[in-house]
Amino acid sequence: PFMKPGRGPRTSRSEPLLSARRTLSLQRTTREPTLSMAWNGMLLLKNSNFPASMHLLEGDLSVASSLLIDGSTAGKVTQLRITQRLRLDHPGPGGYAVLLAVPGTSEETSSSDPAASTQRPLRNLVSYLKQKQAAGVISLPVGGSRDKDNTGVLHAFPPCDFSQQFLDSSAKALAKTEEDFLVMIIVRGAS
């Protein structure tokens, strides 16, 4: 009915606007969160390992890059061992890099000694820290450093009032659930 001989389909003036609106709407719904990857590996606690990846939420990515290394080889570190807990009622540290840890894949980050620890989902570590009302503490760089100016501490916070303040909409989309993320704060020079 809208076709005339020798012409294409008849369109109204508003149709290009509707098409553009549909395209923009589709782009908004399919756009992935864009957080920079800072680290990928295993978080270790006691005899368990938890595959995770960390994404920068706030601060300086170079702080994370320069401290998430093996102190003896200066190479990339793939395992971070939680050696202490920090009580959550303790005042939160001022951070230089705030990262979001979410579940990672185990094939890229397998433990060097699989018999030494049992792999578990990240939500188990989150649950443990929430139950203890504590944050995990990791000294950086792993293995120590002769350069005292290039040391720091990583605090791994489970979901709590303190950690929630760092989550924007893209971080919440990446975290997916309340039980599958940790907010990691790296403080340079802290011990």
Image (cartoon, grey):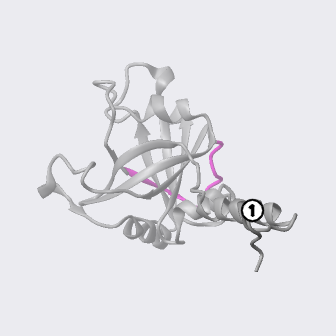
Q: Position of residue 93 (x, y in %)?
A: 62, 46
In the image, residue 159 above or below residue 56: below
Q: Position of residue 27 (x, y in %)?
A: 65, 59
Report the span colored magenta.
83-94
Which residue is at the far bottom? 1
Left or right: where 23 falls relative to 106: right
Most foreground residue, 88 or 1 = 1
Which residue is at the far front? 5
Q: Is residue 3 visible?
A: yes
Left or right: where 67 falls relative to 51: right
Looking at the image, which residue is at 27% across and 48% down? 108
The quarter of the displayed image where residue 10 is located: bottom right
In the image, residue 126 above or below residue 81: below
Q: Is residue 90 magenta?
A: yes
Q: Secondary structure at mark 1?
A: loop
Q: Position of residue 126 (x, y in %)?
A: 45, 66
Most foreground residue, 5 or 79 = 5
Looking at the image, which residue is at 66% across and 55% down? 166
